[in-house]
Amino acid sequence: MELISADIRKSKEIFASIVGPERNFDILNKQMIIGGRLTEFYMIDGLVNDEIMEKLLESYSDFEQEN
């Protein structure tokens, strides 16, 4: 079984089949564009400090698109 793919949609499907974030309310996910690419972060609720995660995600938003 392939565990990760360069195609985010395929990786998301693989992850969902293993963890099931839509069924598991302890798994949080956040989609955003970083450097012109679609990214998705998965976090476990209760193990992530919300303020730190928001600051981290804000810093990623400053990345520029690669040529």
Image (cartoon, helix red, strand yellow):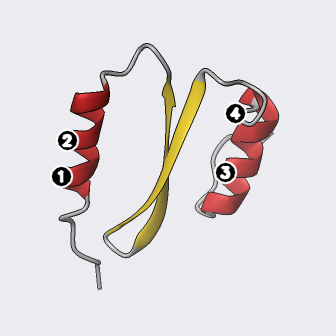
Badge 3 amino acid: Ser
What amino acid type should be assigned to the residue bearing mark 2?
Answer: Lys
Q: Secondary structure at mark 1?
A: helix
- Mark 4 vs mark 3, foreground winner is 4
Residue 18 quadrant? top right
Look at the numbered discs 4 and 3 and tell me whether their residues touch, using CB distance below 8 Å: no
Residue under pointer 1:
59
Q: How far across and down, in percent of the image, does residue 54 sit?
A: 27, 40
Q: Which residue is mark 3?
A: 11
Left/right placement of residue 40 relative to residue 2 reads: left
Q: Which residue matches tag 2?
A: 55
- For the question of whether residue 6 can be seen, the reply is yes
- Kindly indicate whether the residue at mark 3 contacts the one at mark 2 (C-beta within 8 angstroms): no
Residue on which disc 4 sits: 21
State the CA–CA distance, disc 1 to disc 3.
Answer: 24 Å
Dot 3, crowdedness within 10 Å: few (<14), some or many (≥20)? some
Q: Residue at x 72, y 24 (%)?
A: 24
